[in-house]
Amino acid sequence: MEEKKFHLGNPASSVPASDTPSSVGDIEAAEPPSFPETAVPLSVRAEKENLAHSHTAVHHAHGESLLQSTHLAHGETGIQTIQPSALTVGDVEVTRPGAVRLGPAEFAITLPMDSRVKDDYERVLTDGAATMQEFLTRSSPSPQTPSSDRESLHSKVYDIIARLNNVSTHPDLNIPQHLVESDTGPETQAMWAEYSSAKFLLLGHLIELASPHELHIIIEAQNDTKQTVIERYLRGKGFDYTRPREELGGTLEVSLAKGPLSFGVHSNDNVQTPFRAPAAIFVFDTAFNPKSPSVEYIRTTYTRNGGLLPVIWFLISNTCEHIERCLPDTTESERLRLLLQYTARLHDEVGDLQHDALNVQEDAEEIVNYLLHSFTSWQLPMIEPLNFAPSEESDQTSSDESQVAAQKRSLPDEDKEDYTTKRAKVDSPETSQNTQATKGPSQSLDHELHHLDANLVQMNNQHAAEKEQLQKELKEWQSRYWEKDRSLSALQFRYESRMIEFHKIRQERDRLEKSEKSTEQRTEKFKEDITKLKEERSQLKKELEEARQELKSGGAGNESRQLQAENEILKRKAENNSVRLREVVNASDSATHIARIEELQLMVASRDDLLRRKEEELREIRKNRPSTRSTSTQPRSPKWGASSRPTSPGVNNGNGNGNGNGGLAGRGSGLRFSAEAGP
């Protein structure tokens, strides 16, 4: 696999190739860094209290006068607080160059990085190489450089740093559509987070170990997107919101709980009320500021055994976030320059842990043990300082690289010079004068001195040979290590490709199994159909053979007579059926006529009823009619001439009405006619 290199800045400050050795000749034998001589086993570490680390012993130095009892909002007592002045400690051990800078009761854990995530990390570095080189070239801004260009360049550098930190936390943070348009469930997303990030893997082991215990842990993440990813991960692990989500996030922290274990997701922008008294603060990104008022309030309000609330940093080893925590206090532009320079220098060592580091599960066990036992000290190994060269050395790395081989060859000569110097010190003028002054009694001492000198020469020779042998073994083991690392990287790539191919083959196998089952079912059905067809064929053959035998035996005449008889029978049946059909048609016509007659009778009855009601209405009208002149005078005989009074208007009620009954009979007949013609 081709090795990627980043050359940033001017040639004088560029990273030499020997800083990331790729062969035996590039590895310089040097003294190992000062580590503890023996590593305490896990089973014994909890019994010993190591106060050598400044960040573990700081909060033990505060007196009990700092403690005071406070009351929670819900009436609980027993929470101890300390004064904010306890956050500043005077007698603190000076931090070594390259070491992680931590405050009181702050701890850090370095975690590995998967090779697939390393590819994303290097991809971000490759995309931002031009910007980083431009920034390192302009690290000393000249008056000719406009301030707007510097601000634009700074914003680009900050964007690169943010993308690198996103890869360390969760690679999907740089791909917003993966977070928004995700169709997978929370459980699958939690598994993917643990597979992609060692921080979430450590958090998963912590949840598994601390689930039976009553603990509340605050997770600090500055970006809203990171908070969403953390909330989604906790939901995938079975945690539920303690309140409806829309009620959380203001003055109340976003808290999720599962049994006795609960988590709160914070950003140190404002003060939020915790769901319960927290046991620790887990920091997921370097944007966390432990000196912010909200963090100081929580750490001094909810204490641990009289000290500040512990803060645990999750750092991916040798990444940008790890380097940022190790930089000295200087100007912002200088910090950016150093951060970019060391990020490019250590890009091949991203995710590599120190020799005494524990794996992720063991780290989780130690953290849970520390949180559950308030009097237990921090037992995880101290993080080794990064190899930060001074500014003068970083400017002369190219010249130092050419002197590495000469320094390796001059090691035996240096031993001889050391021996000559020691001999010169032994044979100094003061020693010779003392020897002459005490010549008599010092004869035996001179003999012993010469004997010691001979032993010293012999021991130096032995040590030189042993040193040379150890250097050879060191080179051999280092070359084996790098070869093994390269083979493991190639093996990881092959493993992932094999896994992808395996999944495809398994899907193809499942598809073939389903098709095989359906094919077997169709085959069985075809066999049954073939069996039925064979039986029918044999039956038809049998009937055909019988018919042939009958024809041969002269049965055709009998069959003809039989058919004629059947024909006569069918004719008679047809005649009977035609007679029955005519009867049915006649019956149907009779029923239709009868129904019509009944309908007409009902219509006549209804009209008669209507006529009767109209006549009654007419009589009522006549009774209630007002009196007129014709009604008030005496009746007289009608006249048949044209001078008689006209009768009431109506049909056939004219003056020439000669029905012999007067006008009333005519009017009655007219009403009957109108009643019949009305409908």
Image (cartoon, rainbow, N blue to C red):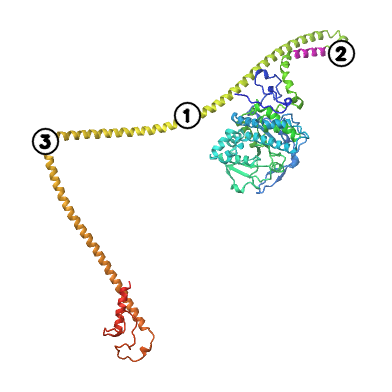
Distance from the alpha carbon under mark 3 to that under mark 2: 158 Å
Q: Which residue is mark 1?
A: 505
Q: Which residue is mark 3?
A: 554
- Between disc 1 and disc 3, the foreground one is 3
Q: Please report contact status of discs 1 and 3: CB closer than 8 Å, yes or no.
A: no
Q: Nearer the viewer, mark 3 or mark 2?
A: 3
Q: Residue furthest front?
A: 642
Q: Is residue 216 visible?
A: no
Check disc 3: other Cα within 10 Å, few if <14, some if 14-19, many if 20+: few
The C terminus, quarter of image? bottom left
Q: Which residues are magenta?
A: 413-426
Q: Residues within 10 Å of mark 1 (few under 14, many from 20)?
A: few
- Which one is closest to the eye, mark 2 or mark 1? 1
Relative to 477, does residue 451 appear above or below in the rendering? above
Could you say which quadrant of the image residue 131 lies in?
Answer: top right
Q: Quadrant of the N terminus?
A: top right
Q: Picture coordinates of residue 163 (x, y %)?
A: 65, 35
Sooner in the amino-acid sequence: mark 1 or mark 3: 1
Q: Amino acid at mark 2?
A: Glu
Reply yes or no: does residue 222 show up in magenta: no
Return the disc, 2 or 1, that comes first in the chain's sequence.
2
Q: Is residue 417 magenta?
A: yes
**Secondary structure under the numbered disc 2 in the rendered image:** helix
Question: Helix, strand, or loop for circle 1?
Answer: helix
Sequence-wise first label, 3 or 2: 2
